[in-house]
Image (cartoon, grey):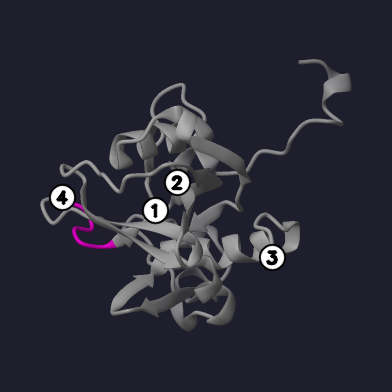
Amino acid sequence: MEREDFFNRRPGMIGERNFSQYAVLVVIVETAEGPAFIFEKRAETLNRQPGEICFPGGRLEAGETPLEAAIRETMEELLVERQQIEILGPGDVFISPFNMMIHPFIAMLRDYRYGFSQEEVGDVFTVPVRFFLEHKPKKYLNHLSHEQPNDFPYECIPGGKNYPWVKGTYETNFYTYQGDVIWGMTACIVESTVELIQNYHLIEGM
């Protein structure tokens, strides 16, 4: 890289290397009720978040782009072929206060037979996109505070142990559809995706 390349560089994010990188595919299928999102219920046998509702996706592998990861995970979890997936474009990146970065991509899935890998997925179900257009999520505000390690060098900062640390907040979203609760990161990605669908007219008539 040369100095003349600097002006047009894509800015990185300070501290990004400390984040775990994940990618998900926000899958849209045609149903009798119109376009709908596909959701997974994670298998109860999984060690992490068993039974929770999510989009297909997972952690990036070495040398893999977020889009490649989202497609690979979707093919593995929903037992579909690459030619069935039409990528519409990227969603907005979700940055968790717990050192996770999730890259969503929005896609249409053709000729889906509602199969899934039983090793990772307990069930799949659909929710009409229009439901999310007509129902806003319930939001709850969570509070974050600092907790310093025992060897923190208080003597190096003004005020020492009495330093006025800034406290942060983050929202947790909840949707309920026919008894299923879609919440947390997945619900935040849903809210963002619905806004993109409207702003960019990704689905005809919405």
Q: Which residue is mark 3?
A: 205
Q: Are marks 4 and 2 in contact (CB under 8 Å)?
A: no
* SS majority, magenta: loop
Q: Which residue is mark 4?
A: 46
Residue 7: image x %, image y %?
87, 31
Q: Comparing marks 4 and 3, which lies closer to the viewer? A: 3
Q: What type is the residue that disc 2 sits on?
A: Val
Q: Are marks 2 and 3 in contact (CB under 8 Å)?
A: no
Separation of disc 4 and disc 3 at Cα? Answer: 39 Å
Q: What type is the residue that disc 1 sits on?
A: Phe
Query: Toward the viewer: 155 or 97?
Result: 97
Q: Which residue is mark 2?
A: 24
Q: Are marks 3 and 1 in contact (CB under 8 Å)?
A: no
Q: Comparing marks 3 and 1, which lies closer to the viewer? A: 3
What residue do we see at 65% from left, 57% from top? Answer: 203
Residue 96: image x %, image y %?
47, 58
Q: Which residue is mark 1?
A: 55
Using the rendered view, name the quadrant where residue 157 is placed.
Answer: bottom right
Q: Are marks 1 and 2 in contact (CB under 8 Å)?
A: yes
Quarter of the image where the C terminus is located: bottom right
Separation of disc 3 and disc 1 at Cα? Answer: 24 Å
What residue do we see at 58% from left, 60% from top? Answer: 193
What residue do we see at 38% from left, 71% from top? Answer: 183
Q: Comparing marks 1 and 4, which lies closer to the viewer? A: 1
Q: For mark 3, does the 10 Å Cα neighbourhood hold few (<14), some (14 to 19), or many (20 or more) residues?
A: few
Which badge, 2 or 3, is on the more N-terminal residue? 2
Residue stretch rendered in magenta on the structure: 46-52
Residue 112: image x %, image y %?
38, 44
Which badge, 1 or 2, is on the more N-terminal residue? 2
Residue 28 in sight in this render: yes
Q: For mark 4, does the 10 Å Cα neighbourhood hold few (<14), some (14 to 19), or many (20 or more) residues?
A: few
Q: Are marks 1 and 4 in contact (CB under 8 Å)?
A: no
